[in-house]
Amino acid sequence: MNEVAVVEKEDQSVALVEGAIHGMPSAQELMVYQTWAKTAAESKMYKGVGTESGIMMIMLAAREYGIGPAQALNGGLHIIEGKVELSARMMSALIRRAKHSVRIIESTDRICTLHGKRRDNGDEFTASFTIEEAQQAGLIKDKGAWKKTPKDMLFARAMTRLARQLFADVVGIGYVEGEISGDDPEDLPEVQPINELQLEHVPEVKQAEESALLAELMEKLDKDDCHYMNEFIKIVSDHYGWDKHATLKKFLADVDQTLEKFHKWKNTRKDA
């Protein structure tokens, strides 16, 4: 394993959130992200999110948290003046994904109280947010979300208060949605969602991801084996009726087994 690979592996092992990826993306990753951003911008479904470069920055910020691009673009994450805003649901999901505990003590139109407990050291904290605090902060506006759904808004603020105190390693420097912009979540630009499954079927995205998957697989082979692997991919694809993209995903899901079968096939082929 080369030094760069060792550094990348160490970066990933100390990630703030389980599933997050730190360090610079590889060239193959960047190619996939750039294609996603271009496709998302051209789809006209993310006019409120920003330009192609803005969409790209949202996806790269989401990568640090281990959040999928589609989840981020569909309201999970915003970037306001260079600062990251996370939805309350996304904060909760990240905390629970890291296997910490969040319990609702009280949730009404007047107050929300949450209790959190860390799984690693057992530290606990209780955080609350009241409608009086929201009034003092000038958050309540006519026809705004604080008027329509105060219970949900109180939950969001209590969640970010709890997260900063007890789960700072999970949410990083993220703010709760609307905290920087001053907009209620319901007032933020509306986007028409497109999920990851739909994007996988956009030709440009699929082709870019296929190239990245192939490059990742080829990195595990000796140079002389690359030609044989291309032939092996075609044989397996034809046998099972998969396209190349699906075959590569299957191969990379269990690389050791793939390489074992590949070398057996190659030896048989050479002996034939």
Image: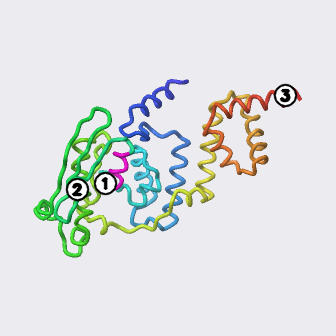
For residue 90: magenta?
yes
Q: What kind of element bears circle 3?
A: helix
Q: In which quarter of the image is residue 73?
A: bottom left
Relative height, residue 25 to residue 42 (above, below)? above
In the rendered image, the quadrant that contains the C terminus is top right
Q: Residue 85 carries which label?
A: 1
Q: Residue at x 56, y 61 (%)?
A: 198
Q: Distance between the residues labelled 2 and 3?
A: 65 Å
Q: What kind of element bears circle 1?
A: strand
Residue farthest front in this picture: 105
Q: Which amino acid does label 1 sit on?
A: Glu
Q: Which residue is drawn at 29% across and 55% down?
A: 81
Q: What residue type is labelled 3?
A: Lys
Residue farthest bottom in this picture: 143
Q: Which of marks 2 and 1 is in front?
A: 2
Which of the marked residues, 2 or 1, is nearer the chain's N terminus?
1
Whole-percent x, y for residue 35 in the image: 54, 53
From which residue to which does the magenta span run? 89-96
Find disc 3 in the rendering and name its residue: 270
Magenta segment, prevailing SS (helix, strand or loop): helix
Q: What kind of element bears circle 2?
A: helix
The residue nearer to you, when weighing 166 against 201, is 166
